[in-house]
């Protein structure tokens, strides 16, 4: 078995515990079914291309992107825990290289991202099935969004984990960054209705691009902006992955 | 055949030299002890030999492979128990061993057998289902050492493996290591506990301030550097009388608390002993006890480090 696959196996074993899986499902479910239906009285319909989505369908699709982002926290947690508990050095005196280690993290978060996306798609399906448009291209878009989003946010989590040594610092920084990403984005509400500075800030946030691509993958609303968003997502994921890999390579032992 | 050959090996961090041009040649199938005080360069040397860090200068050849050019090839053939704890907090003891074997690509059936064998050998059966995060420091250390035997290797590096272990666990670990060495495994072993080194090592190197100051078998080290002998005499007389009587003799110490213990530490201990016995007999001071204490590795180590520090200052 290839060393990267062996490390992915190990990463999934230590990451996919019951608590994590429950959190991955329960957390978005609360948003979808509590916030989704509670806010329906405030947000009636949301225009999306030539469609009008009801708010539960809008938030359910947004939660797929949100969950991909959330699941990539695993990447940062794996690196941080490995450093804290001595496994980073132990792995590197074994039959592995730093590249193996970084690639295994990417594959792990890619797999977890896909599982998360599939879980929320299954859970949210009853809410958005009326407007759904699945074909080869839209499914391809969903897979691209899951993988690119996982690499992008996983790299951010990895970068943070390589820079911080204390658990308090790691938790504060990662939660603050991810809170900003979550709420200054189109995951929960459309940019069009938000006040001007905020709606502009939405487009400085990679989660907005991820969520927009996911929605295009579900509802089939293609636009010129979507092509740019796909490119931004791919380029940003690549740049951040290179930075994360370089920082990991420089990590002193 | 040498399985570790290092030549002019150095590692510097800025202006600090952690390892200073050391040479090593370690034969296969032996237990090689690497001793030194804190900060002497033991762990840095292990990190260099296990390819975890690159040397500033020098060459390293492990099992016939150039470790600087082909670090991964070396790591596939060695086992390493680092000084710092390493564990997966959420995995049970049994699962830790099993997963570690999987990471080393050990076949499922072999993994299963080895897990059972190691749980028994390291007395871990009772805690097999307990998560690593809930173990005591000593238990975690036992798991860490046991885990390394899940995979095949030709050379094992053990960096202070007995830290945190109780005397019985320590002894059974040392015996396990001895058994593995007899089966052909080469072991590079560092420790602070010199009795351990004396108990298991075939050859010993002493490192101080990044330089190796002695390499030999424990017996030869004692022969070469253990000329000074220690003789202890216990008498009934008080210190005041004794110190007056022995005032003309060198190389002895009187325990001022009891005033009745005389310790002779000298390269010429027999002659000093004779003089003291003569004085005691002449003055009718009865001897209650007399013991010749063999020179321990610890005393040699302390003397050598002290001399090395003095010459470098």
Image: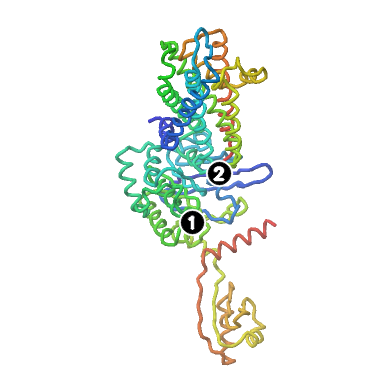
Q: Disc 1 to disc 2, how far (Cα)?
A: 34 Å
- In percent of width and height, residue A5 lies at 41, 30
Mark 1, mark 2: which one is toward the viewer?
1
The quadrant where residue B213 appears: bottom right
Q: Earlier in the sequence, mark 1 or mark 2?
A: 2
Which of the pair B57/A243 is nearer the observer? A243
Q: Could you say whether the residue bearing mark 1 is in a helix, strand or loop?
A: loop
Image-based side of B126 in relation to B62, left or right: left
Q: Is residue B219 above or below residue B141?
A: below
Q: Is residue B247 above or below residue A87?
A: below
Chain of the residue under label 1: B
- In percent of width and height, residue B130 lies at 39, 49
Q: Could you say whether the residue bearing mark 2 is in a helix, strand or loop?
A: strand
- In percent of width and height, residue A59 lies at 50, 21
How is colour applied across the structure in the image? rainbow
**Which residue is depicted at the point 51% across and 29% down?**
A70
Image mark for residue B164: 1
Asked if labels 1 and 2 share a chain, the reply is yes
**Which residue is depicted at the point 37% across and 31% down?**
A1
**Which residue is depicted at the point 60% across and 30% down?**
A177
Which of the pair B236/A7 is nearer the observer? A7
Image mark for residue B95: none
Is residue A28 in view from this perspective? yes
Which of the pair B186/A131 is nearer the observer? A131
- In percent of width and height, residue A158 lies at 55, 32
Q: Residues within 10 Å of mark 1 (few under 14, many from 20)?
A: some
Name the quadrant of the C terminus of chain B: bottom right
Say which residue label 2 marks: B7
């Amino acid at each position: 078995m290839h060393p990267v696959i062996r490390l992915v196996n190990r990463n999934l074993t230590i990451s996919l515990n019951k608590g994590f899986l429950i959190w991955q499902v329960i957390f978005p479910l609360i948003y979808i079914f509590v916030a989704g239906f509670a806010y329906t009285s405030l947000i009636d319909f949301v225009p999306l291309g030539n469609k009008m989505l009801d708010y539960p369908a809008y938030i359910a699709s947004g939660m797929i992107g949100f969950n991909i982002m959330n699941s990539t926290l695993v990447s940062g947690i794996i690196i941080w825990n490995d450093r804290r508990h001595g496994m980073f050095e132990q792995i590197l005196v074994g039959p592995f290289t730093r590249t193996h280690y970084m690639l295994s993290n990417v594959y792990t978060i890619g797999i977890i991202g896909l599982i998360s996306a599939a879980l929320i798609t299954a859970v949210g399906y009853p809410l958005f099935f009326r407007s759904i448009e699945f074909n080869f291209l839209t499914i391809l878009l969903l897979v691209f969004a899951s993988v690119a989003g996982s690499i992008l946010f996983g790299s951010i989590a990895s970068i943070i984990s390589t820079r911080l040594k204390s658990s308090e610092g790691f938790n504060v920084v990662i939660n603050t960054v991810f809170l900003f990403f979550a709420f200054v984005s189109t995951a929960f509400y459309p940019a069009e209705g938000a006040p001007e500075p905020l709606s502009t800030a939405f487009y400085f946030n990679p989660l907005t691009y991820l969520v927009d691509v996911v929605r295009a993958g579900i509802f089939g609303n293609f636009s010129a902006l979507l092509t740019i968003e796909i490119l931004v997502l791919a380029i940003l994921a690549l740049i951040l992955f290179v930075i994360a890999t370089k920082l990991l390579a420089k990590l002193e032992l | 055949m040498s399985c570790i050959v290092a030549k002019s090996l150095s590692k510097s961090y800025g202006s600090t030299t952690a390892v200073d041009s050391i040479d090593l040649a370690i034969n296969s199938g032996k237990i090689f002890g690497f001793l030194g005080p804190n900060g002497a360069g033991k762990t840095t040397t292990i990190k260099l030999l296990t390819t975890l860090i690159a040397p500033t200068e020098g060459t390293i050849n492990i099992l016939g492979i150039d470790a600087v050019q082909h670090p991964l090839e070396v790591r596939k053939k060695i086992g390493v128990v680092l000084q710092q704890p390493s564990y997966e907090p959420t995995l049970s003891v049994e699962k830790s061993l099993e997963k570690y074997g999987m990471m080393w690509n050990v076949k499922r059936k072999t993994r299963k057998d080895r897990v059972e064998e190691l749980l028994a050998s390291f007395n871990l059966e009772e805690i097999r289902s307990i998560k690593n995060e809930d173990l005591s420091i000593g238990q975690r250390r036992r798991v860490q050492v046991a885990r390394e035997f899940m995979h095949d290797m030709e050379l094992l590096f053990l960096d202070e493996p007995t830290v945190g272990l109780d005397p019985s666990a320590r002894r059974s670990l040392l015996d396990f290591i001895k058994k593995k060495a007899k089966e052909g495994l080469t072991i590079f072993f560092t420790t602070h506990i010199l009795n351990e080194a004396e108990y298991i090592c075939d050859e010993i190197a002493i490192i101080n301030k990044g330089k190796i100051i002695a390499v030999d078998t424990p017996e030869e080290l004692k022969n070469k550097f253990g000329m000074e002998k220690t003789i202890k005499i216990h008498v009934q007389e008080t210190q005041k009388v004794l110190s007056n009587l022995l005032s003309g003799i060198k190389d002895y110490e009187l325990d001022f608390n009891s005033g009745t213990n005389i310790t002779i530490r000298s390269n010429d201990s027999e002659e000093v002993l004779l003089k003291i016995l003569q004085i005691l007999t002449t003055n009718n001071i009865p001897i209650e006890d007399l013991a010749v204490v063999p020179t321990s590795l610890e005393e040699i180590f302390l003397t050598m480090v002290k001399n090395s520090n003095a010459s470098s200052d």
